[in-house]
Structures are given as C-alpha cells and as structure tokens.
Amino acid sequence: MGGRSSVVRASGWLGVVLLCGLTGCATLFTGTRDTIRFDSDPRGAEVYINGERICRTPCQTPVRRSMGIREASLRLDGYETRVFRLETDFNYVSLLNLSFLVGWAVDIATGAIIRYDRRDYRFDLVPAPVSAWRRADTIRIDTVRRRVDILVRTD
C-alpha cells in the first residue's frame, strides 16, 4: 500500500510541475497585454498600430504584447504623419520559469516574455506643407481666396 501512495503523490507533484510549466509564469502573472495611452496636440489624431486603426487621441487602449516590432502612427488631416515604434523591454517575471522549457515556450508564443516599457506617448504634430494637402483642401482654399478678392475689389 505504501508504494501506491508514493506513486499517487509523485504523479500529483508531476501534475503540479507540468501545470506550472505549461502556463508560463509571465503569461500567468502579468498577462499578455499592456494598457498604453496616446495623446497629441492637436487632439483627434487617429492612432494606428501595425496598420490597424485603434482609436483617436486622447485615448487609452490595451495592446497585445508581441515578439515582433510594433510600429505605431498618428494621422491627422493637414498634419505630417508621426511614425514611431512602441518601446519594449524584457519581462523579468518570465525568469520564474527557471528550468521549465515549456513555460518559456508559452511566454514566447504569447509575447509575455516582453512588456511595453513606455506606456504613455504624446506628440506635438507638425503642420504638413501645402503641397501635401489633399486636392479638396486646396480647392476650398482657392474658393475662399476668390471670395476674399471679390469683397476686397473696389471698382
């Protein structure tokens, strides 16, 4: 009987070890997303991450962690597009995996092995040169100039 209980205990411990190894410590303890805040002057710029529209400034949004490079941009009509990378750092919580190779693999696969180091981005947008404006904007400006010329003329 003593042999059977030790086998049950050993298999119980093996189950605990496997469960810890399969979850990945960083994935389990810190999750797979970080909340990042975006703001701009002027406000109302569209925020894109890897080409996908996320929100309008000012905004705060959860961003999934990823091993790849995350490129973001702020776009607002009449202003130059601001392109930047989301800054990441190693997530030291993943060191708790120690010798659990499966845990490391899970943290790598979920992106939890990294974290977003900077969580607040604010940029002053620069007005775009007139040549970069859309044609519709140029037509509106020409129409306003014509109307001003008519009002100013004294025949």
Image: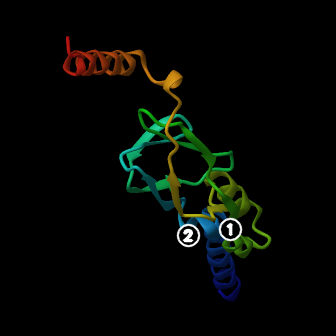
Residue drawn 60% across the image and 64% down it = 118
Residue 3 pos. (x, y %): 71, 83
At horizontal 71% and vertical 73% (from top left) the residue drawn is: 92
Q: Is 69 situated above or below 100?
A: above
What kind of colouring is applied to the model shown? rainbow
Disc 2 to disc 1, C-alpha distance? 9 Å
Point out residue 77 in the picture as x, y percentages from the top left corner.
41, 33
**Residue 22 or 137: which is nearer the viewer?**
137
Q: Please rate how many residues cluster around mark 1, counting C-alpha atoms within 10 Å: few if below 14, some from 14 to 19, many from 20.
A: some
Q: Residue furthest bottom?
A: 2
Query: Where's residue 140, x and y in %?
Result: 31, 19
Kind of residue at badge 1: Asn
Q: What SS does tag 2 mark?
A: helix
Among the 4 quarters of the image, the one containing residue 29: bottom right
Bin the neighbour count of mark 2 within 10 Å (Cα to Cα): few under 14, some 14-19, many 20 and up. some
Q: Nearer the viewer, residue 139 or 83?
A: 139
In the rendered image, the vertical position of residue 30 relative to residue 138, given as above or below: below
Q: Is residue 151 left or right of residue 7?
A: left
Labels 2 and 1 touching (C-beta < 8 A): yes
In the image, taking residue 99 as reference, residue 115 lies left or right, namely left
Query: Percent position (x, y) of residue 132?
Result: 52, 24
Q: Which residue is mark 2?
A: 30
Task: Say which residue appears at 22% left-offset and 15% top-offset.
Answer: 150
- Most foreground residue, 55 or 132: 132
Which residue position is annotated with label 1? 91
Q: Amino acid at mark 2?
A: Thr
